[in-house]
Image (tube, rainbow, N blue to C red):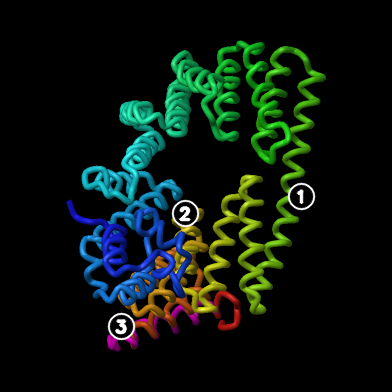
Amino acid sequence: MKATLGQKIRELRIRKGLTQSDLSAGLVTPSMISQIESDKANPSHSLLSSIAEKLDTPIEYFLTDTETQMEKVSVYRIARALMANKDYEKAVPMLLDLEENPSPHVSSIDVAYDIAECHMNVGEFAKATERFESVLDSAMARNDVGISLLVLNQLGEISFQEKNYPIAIHYWKKAHEMIKKGQTAELYLHAKIVKNLGSVYYKLGEYGEALTYYREADGLLDGSNQFKQIGDIYLQLGFTYREMGEFEKAAEYSQYALSIFESLNHMKLTIDVKAKYGIVSGETGNLEEASRVLATCMEDYREIGCLYEIGQLHSDLARLLIQDKQYEQALKHCEDALTYFAEENSDRAHVYRMNGQIEQARGNLEQAIDSLKRAVVVYQDQQSFGELVKSYSILGDIYKEKGDFKEAMECLENMNAAMEENLRERKIVI
């Protein structure tokens, strides 16, 4: 069996009589070296190069077979990004390939779960059910409660969508009973399972049962910051009381729901202001303060369900890090940002363009060209001529750097055409 990257580093370190502290000195923390050696973390190319130098070993020794594994990690991240973008049909072949050719750095049960989720989201319920049940068997055998509860909830969702309410109740009650028996569950998922039980009984016209579960879900979230979920529960309570003819209570809970949703809008405005402060801090040179403030804003947005805004902040942080030439961190924020933006969204094109700038700075010109071309496609579709001008300018510079002057000239011509369209759009050219 081939040694992993971590095993190779550990073996050489011990052979040279170095401690983890010795190897980490001037590079990273000893705990990071420990994580790398146990294959829980993957070093960047620059860090791996420094480690190789300290161990007096060519970096190629470590890259043997490691590149393949890193490629698989990259493929998994791309597949997950496609799923976040609701492009499930494109994600499935990539996930199936990972399933057939597993990697120690990618959880096989996570891949199987993601394949099932893709089938579910494109309406292939039979395939999804079969897959989820297989994942459930594996999770139960491993005593993985977290995955088991997630799968049971999804199986209930499928049955609910198929209007097979008794089966939906079966799955959700099974999950509910596991939690009641002492199995730990993440609060949001716990409350969602209970709320789902309320919803299915509401559909069946059993309003007393529905109320019981809605109230339980409300009690679980009492004092939490899951405001959107609480608002949804209050709205469902309003519907249920209305069906029962208790119109005063229906109005009361509907008003609670309205107040929460209005408060969420006010909270978002507060976070927006804080985020602007963070961006300004970064633009004036205080990148540490900017990173701290924007990370806090991301968590705040997550709590109120504003996921698109999280993507925007990842994009803003990437831009600030590029200006500071922190390319590795910038690239990570670009990857994170893409998981929040739809394919046709211009924000996605901005991220592609930043990816191109990062790869250009790192000397990866082919990757830079590929990213810029992706940005150009989106900007052309949206007729964002101003952004096209900037993109063609960067792309032309990359082609010149590569020595491909024919393509560089074509970019210049496209840039001039986009500039004319931009001026015409702004009524500067008649």
Looking at the image, is mark 1 or mark 3 earlier in the sequence?
A: 1
Disc number for residue 339: 2
The amino acid beneath tag 2 is: Thr
Depth check: give the residue in front, 69 or 429: 69
Q: Residues within 10 Å of mark 3 (few under 14, many from 20)?
A: some
Q: Label 3 near label 1: C-beta < 8 Å?
A: no
Q: Closer to us: mark 2 or mark 3?
A: 2
**Where residue 328 sits: x, y (%)?**
44, 70
Indicate whether 68 appears above or below 91: below
Q: Quadrant of the C terminus?
A: bottom right
Q: Which residue is mark 3?
A: 407
Q: Which residues are magenta?
A: 401-422
Label 2 crowd bin: few (<14), some (14–19), many (20+), radius 10 Å: many
Q: Residues within 10 Å of mark 1 (few under 14, many from 20)?
A: few
- The residue at which mark 1 appears reads as 266
Secondary structure state at the residue bearing disc 1: helix
Q: Vertical placement of 320 versus 264: above or below?
A: below
Q: Residue at x 52, y 76 (%)?
A: 386
Q: Residue at x 75, y 56 (%)?
A: 270
Image spot of residue 405 (x, y percent)? 29, 88
On screen, residue 347 above or below 284: above
Tell me residue 71's x, y (percent). 29, 59
Whole-number angstrom distance, CA of label 1 to CA of label 2: 26 Å
Going 78% across and 38% down the picture, which residue do you hit?
259
How far, Cα to Cα, is label 2 from label 3? 31 Å
